[in-house]
Amino acid sequence: MVFSSQIFVFIFLPLTILLGCGALVIGRNRPGAVKASNAFLLLASLIFYAWGEPLYVFLLIAETLFCFFMALLMESAPGLRKLWLAGALLAVLGTLCFFKYSAFLTGIAAGFLPLGALYGTLSKVALPLGISFYSFQLMSYFIDVYRGRIAPQRNILRLLLYVSFFPQLVAGPIVKYSDVENMLTGRRFEITEAAFGLRRFVAGLAKKLIIANTAALVADSVFGQTPESLGSGAALIGAFAYVVQIYFDFSGYSDMAIGIGRVFGFRFNENFRHPYASLSVKEFWRRWHVSLSSWFRDYLYIPLGGNRKGRLRTVLNKVIVFFFTGLWHGANFTFIVWGLWHGIFLLIEEYTSGLRDRVRGRSRIVKAVMGALGFIYTFAVVTLGFVMFRSDNISRGLGFIARMFSFTGGVPANVALTLTPYTVFILIIAIPAAMPLKDWCVGIFRKIWGAEKTAATLERHALVLNLASFAVALLLFGLCAMALATSAYNPFIYFRF
């Protein structure tokens, strides 16, 4: 079951809100009401997962149970904490690697060892939905217990709800246990919070159904061609369409997860902060998939030494982090190349940051020009990286990039069919929709009116602005309902993750 489906939007979600939030309302947000709500949400989450993975739901439960007991052992037998940590890591990482990387690694080894039959068997093993996300959540839980940052959870149902909670189960954001620990026992239902949560859900649903799915039509038609059949124009259009698709798809799912969580009284951290407005690759990674980058920072980069052991070690640590960042996304060399591609540019920026700061500080004009160049450079790096990310193999990715700069004409007929006035319009409006227009407008008003007058004006008109935003959300929901009713094209890209 996916968020952008009729059964989820019109049946599953309304029923879950009715039961999960109804328990809090009837019980007046008391501890007993929270327990009842947790029970409904846990049952709903397991049904949600079992809808598409009827067997692998038992794997999720088994891994959670094992980590639950390992965390308790860390507290009750602290002298063996490292042993319990190693056992938990081995179980979770071992399971993740078996399902996600065993066929990939065996396929490499089959090039020089007689492992063809084993590779054929492993390649047929289905990847459990969301395993990359819930594995990282489990690891963050028991690592934080090991570090003494949190106490182990003694109620297995609460831990299972944390791991399986359906809004963030299949596509993130990756939620740390410490961020929701108190919400599992003391959250409240508030009608205004629920309203804003539903508005956020609709915004994410519109991102997915209206923009991402439309862009996917173009991207899939272009990437479905052989690179040799593409002119530079078609290749550039396909690359841009995929850049639009992956952002609005991924951030749309995060918006929906954050919105649904807010309805039930959970506050998840932001996962995307308008990354395409970045002026450097470093800034891009502060805005893109924030929960993943912060996870690697806290549980890999800093334990490796971070930037505390000299420049050479810092470089090595960053290369390692971005190698695994790419590998996390999928068992393919294209993902590894994508990760290292970003890592290389981060290192270049680190070594040239002093020079850039000196040039940028000379005048406003120079600063504006540097900002424009930084935006173009960053968007180009990101786009080329995503071309490799989307490609089936490195050779095909390189061929596609070569066609982008071939300066040849020609658009295949089936690609031209997708470039209708509607799809072109959606691709155009995707550009401003990906930008932080609200922040920019507030910034302009602050320069004109001053910070105090701007804040007072926004507060005075808050009711009107909110009513307008809910009216827009209602209109968007109507468009989403039409899209669900009239289109069967609804790609789910997270099966690869």
Image (cartoon, grey):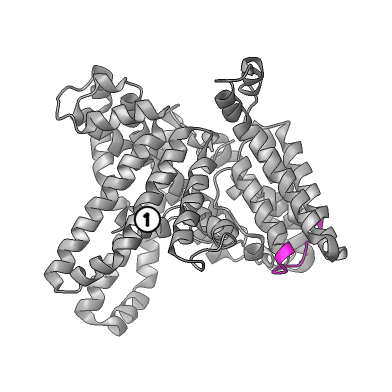
**Residue under circle 1?**
346
Residue 493 coordinates in the image, percent (x, y): 48, 35
Residue at figure coordinates x 67%, y 65% from the top left: 183
Left/right placement of residue 296 relative to residue 23 reads left
Question: Observer-nearest residue: 117 or 150?
Answer: 117
Image: 187 above or below 51: below
Residue reaching furthest to the left: 365
How many neighbours does mark 1 have within 10 angstroms: few (below 14), some (14-19), or many (20 or more)? Answer: many
- Write down the quadrant of residue 388 in the picture: top left
Q: Main secondary structure of the magenta part?
A: loop
Image: 323 above or below 460: above
Left/right placement of residue 349 relative to residue 7 reads left
State the count of labels: 1
Residue 478 coordinates in the image, percent (x, y): 41, 43
Left/right placement of residue 99 relative to residue 452 reads right
Residue 33 coordinates in the image, percent (x, y): 76, 62
- Write down the quadrant of residue 461 in the picture: bottom left
Q: Is residue 147 magenta?
A: yes
Question: Observer-nearest residue: 353 or 299?
Answer: 353
Q: Quadrant of the N terminus?
A: top right
Residue reaching furthest to the bottom: 452
Which stretch is magenta?
145-155
The three-letter code of the residue at mark 1 reads: Leu
Left/right placement of residue 206 relative to residue 4 reads left
Residue 64 coordinates in the image, percent (x, y): 75, 48
Residue at figure coordinates x 61%, y 61% from the top left: 266
Q: Quadrant of the C terminus?
A: top right
Residue 422 visible at all: no
Q: Is residue 448 magenta?
A: no
Q: Secondary structure at mark 1?
A: helix
Residue 238 visible at all: yes
Question: Observer-nearest residue: 79 or 456?
Answer: 79
